[in-house]
Amino acid sequence: MNELYKREAFPVTIGSMTLYCENFKVSTIAQMTEQPTVTGLTAITNRFKKCSKLVLSGRVYDEDQPLRFVTVSNNMGNNDTYNINYRGINFYSCRINGVIVEDKGDGFSYVTITLSTSAFIYPTREE
Amino acid sequence: MIDVINTIKQNLIESGAENIYTAFDTLPVSSKGKFFTVIGVKNFECSKPVFSQFITYIPFKTELEIKVIAPESTSMETLCQYYNENIGNILDNMTGMSIHISDISIKQDKNICRLLLNVSVHAEGIRKINRQTEENL
């Protein structure tokens, strides 16, 4: 018989706030510079890894302060960095790029936080 | 689902309405009083829960059916007045759930030969459940 498991939202702590993420996306791309050669082919002259972008989304229910997550955006103008762990993967030195807090009138705040990091991504070591 | 019906029933009783019953009880009609109200459920829907550290919030939507049954030989105007004074006002001012009336109709109930006012009520709310975490255990 196949096993069943329940998928819950995973908590991610950013500073003093904890967001229970229902959606999580991380994307990383490489930037390349190409130059043509005399034979009509191309040569890659430079290549580097761009920042990894993290997008965290979740719903928040707070009767007293329904839009409290919008205060996370106060840290966008300084050099604060955050270490994030999501499902066993560590993202170090993340900087906040964007915060969206949306109230659609159904009682919840829909929160989306975008971060970026240039650090290497490490899985959590199993002890 | 039963919590929602009981909450509405309790609100009506605490606000002074009499003879409030749920659709699940088995009392005979003759013992329910002259005017009586029955609360039932047409449909009930829960959506994906929202989690926080100690509480799980479960949003729900439900379509309730509230029936007000009048004594024999009661006019439609009397039944409407009874509903407005004893049920309608209380539903309009109810807190804890977002309630609005989607349909009202009056007809003769052929089974009991009494006039019946049928109200469809759309209610939305959020149910809170305490989470048992390892720290709480």
Image (cartoon, coloured by chain):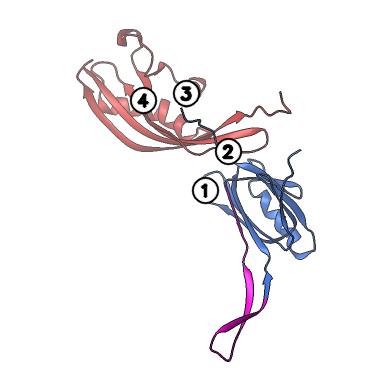
Q: Secondary structure at mark 4?
A: helix
**Residue A91 located left or right of residue B42:** right
Residue lying at 67% horizontally and 33% vertically, measured from the top left: B54
Discs 2/4, front: 2
Chain B: give its colour: red
Above or below — where is A24 with respect to A117? above
Point 33% across, 14% down: residue: B34
Closer to the camera, A4 or B21? A4
- Work out how far the residue at label 2 is from the one at label 4, CA to CA, in angstroms: 47 Å
In terms of depth relative to the viewer, which is nearer, B86 or A121?
A121
* Identity, as a three-letter code, of the amino acid under mark 1: Gly
Q: Is residue A43 magenta?
A: yes
**Element carrying mark 1:** loop
Report which residue position mark 1 lands on. A105
In 3D space, how far apart are the residues under numbered discs 1 and 4 (Cα atoms)?
Answer: 33 Å
Q: What numbered label is drawn on residue A8?
A: 2
Q: How many marks?
A: 4
Q: Chain of mark 1?
A: A
Going by the numbered disc 3, the residue's amino acid type is Leu
> Which amino acid, by three-letter code, is at mark 2?
Glu
Residue A44: image quadrant is bottom right
Left or right: residue B98 compared with residue B114: right
